[in-house]
Amino acid sequence: MTSTAASRRHRRRPLNSAWGYVLVAPAMLVFAVFSIGPTVFAFGISLFDWNYLNAAKSTFVGLENYLRLADLDRDPSFLQTMGVSLYFVGAMVIGGTVMSLALAMLMRRATKLMLAARASVFLAHVTPIVATSLVWIWIYNPRFGLANGVLHLFGMDSLDWLGSRSTAMISIIVYTLWHEVGFTMIIFVGGLATISGELSEAARVDGATGLKEFWYITLPQLTGYVIFVVVIGSIASLHAFTQFFMLTGGGPDHATATLGYQLYQQAFVFRKTGYGAALAVVLFTICAVLSLSQLRLSRRLNRTD
Amino acid sequence: MSTFPRRKVLTAAGTLGALAVTAPTLASCAGEDTPPAPPAGDTTTPVTITFMHSMASGALKPALEAIVEAFRDEQPHITVELIEQPNYGQLRAQIEAQTAAGEPPTIAQVYGDWAASYADAGVLVNLDQYAAESDQWDKFFTGVQNDLKLTDGSIWMWPFNKSVMVQYYNTEMVTEAPTTWEEFATIAEEVSDDTVIALSIDPGDASGPAGGTQLFEALAEAFGDGVFAEDGSPDFTGEGSVRALEYLVDLKNKGALALGKDYPGQQALGSQTGALDVSTVASYQYNLQAVDGKFELGVATMPKGPAKVGNIMAGTNIALFDNDDDNVVAAAWTFMQFLASAEQQAQWSAATGYLPVHSDALNEPAFTDYVADTPWVADATEQLNESQSLPPVAWAQECSGKLAAAITEAVNGGDVMAALTKAQEAALKVQQESA
């Protein structure tokens, strides 16, 4: 029997048993009611000028909500929102991956001190975003905040960290990196524990510097972990909402209005449910493409391995 | 066989999608052309009504419970079930979730722009006939009466907790409250130094206006014209708006104004790094807490501008949701009138700091005692006659958010006219889409 045929049979096997369906039915029912149903419903709503209080007053508008996405005169336009999202996602993926990898390399040894350091970095990740955002609002307070206190130590003027277009997004990125980097660092620490020490040892014997050893020996062995961190980082950043809600409310002047935040704004604050649903469909599509890409990359890497 | 589950999933998805698409056309549609008269109701049958509110903090909660208790003594057959929400945002979400599910509260606190959406969706009771048959209507302050109508000219709400803006000040820094905005600027500049910035405001942001935008709207009234036309259209580039924003920018340039978040004026006043705070009368108890006896807190009515005393009315009204049961509607209407009665408004005002909506409340002992201790309340109450509130249109909040963004931009160094023009264009777009 060929491996392809065996693989097919393996995939078919659960379908041959009625009990299989019975056993997965409760989970599928929950999934259908709370995930699939609402998702399909959102697709439907995106085709309407939806009256959220009285569905009978909703009118079918076809693709009008999607056409509005192309309207550059909107404030903010969809393009602007996507730009803000990509800025945040790019900074989080690149900055987050590099920082967490660097921290993981620094803390890879399981000494007591390193374990304590790992725990302290990870601790930020398990704190609630709402609570820590409130603390960071005070840190960024233009009059009494710690951030400006540090600037004053170096003789610099105060900044309105969250109120200025030029610093608001950077301030949120700094907060989010502080909150998220502990999680991805732990993934890399786990990855570093699984890679072969022999290759590194051989490289050192051959005279490789620390940097070359990391670049040519360690990093290639962590490729799978890097891809995983990049993909989950991208999806999490696209979905990021709470820190924007708490710290800036999408302002100033939409400088921190990401796609996820605008979705909330349009659907639940300004009650433009149809347009909000269209934004949700776009966000869903982007996340689906990213997830499928990750699956394909992972499969390809597994085959290569 | 391998395609079986996928087919099933697709079929289910298709069914749900079809349901989503056809649901509105399957649902029934109802409408009424003539405003209904209040039903008589049966005063012998026990009835329960629900009142969804967000009077959940400080003195508000016990004060509302006391009103309900007094109502129970007067109307023993009616039970008022209070459904508390922690804040106005949550209140709106909860009202709308229940309404969308077909089970709205009997009555609820609402702002004008919420009521506009609800009336448009056909879920509110028009109160024109109710008001015509009520002896309370003529007793409400003029500004309050206007605040109960939507742009169609009909009455859709009944008053409850209203407030206007006043100025709070540190009496050790500001010996006498300014009476004009010109004086205000002079005093603000004089008291500001390296550690004190006279006034801190939070304009809010594009997602929604905050107190700083409300102050701007009052300033625009004081300097010429309001930020919204009578029909609710945004008018952000009028003389009043331009002069108001120039005034704030000037204060900032003189080191007398700072922007912040989450009631920065109150924070600065309490920490003695601010000298003045402009907020509503409902902030009185919170400002007293912030000051905590460190100095005597002064309170005065809003300063006068070149055009007039501009003031913005805040607070909510009560809306009556559609209900098939006449007894429930009659009971709710009885309670709404009880809430707005002179006696209850006087006690509510004395307990919470909100202003009475009923003019006869000024002669009630509870209110006269309260005014004896806080004389500024009498002047603030008079301003209910002239105060403006956000226009009761669905796009008001989003448009005000554009204004908030313009204020932040200009105060942080942007061009005043450019910021207002941009906000005006964005607001007109919002209005067009909403209309």
Image (cartoon, coloured by chain):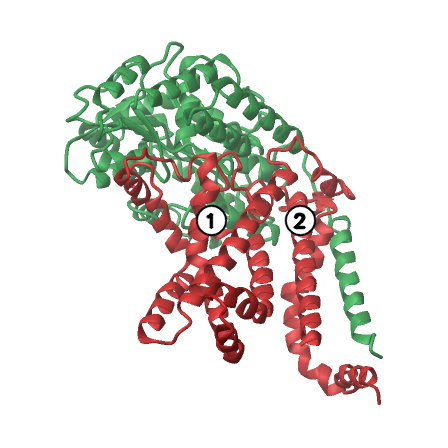
Chain colours: A red, B green
Q: CA distance from mark 2 to mark 1?
A: 27 Å
- Measured as percent of width and height from the top left, residue A27 is found at 64, 75
- Residue B289 visible in the picture: yes
Do marks 2 and 1 share a chain? yes
- Residue B353 visible in the picture: no
Residue A277, label in figure: 2
Identify whether B209 is placed above or below A82: above
- Measured as percent of width and height from the top left, residue A227 is found at 60, 64
- Measured as percent of width and height from the top left, residue A63 is found at 77, 43
Q: Nearer the viewer, residue B424 or B309?
A: B424
Element marked by disc 2: helix
Q: Is residue A8 left or right of residue B87?
A: right
Q: Nearer the viewer, residue A45 or A20?
A: A20
Q: Residue furthest bottom?
A: A1
Ranked by sequence position, the earlier of labels 2 and 1 is: 1
- The chain holding disc 2 is A
- Return the residue at label 1: A173
| Residue at 43% in and 29% down | B213
The quadrant in which residue B34 appears is top right
Q: Is residue A150 left or right of residue B7?
A: left
Q: In the image, what residue type sits under mark 2?
A: Ala
Identify whether B319 is placed above or below A281: above
Q: In the image, what residue type sits under mark 1?
A: Ile
- Measured as percent of width and height from the top left, residue B225 is found at 47, 15
The quadrant in which residue B357 appears is top left
Q: Nearer the viewer, residue A87 or B345?
A: A87
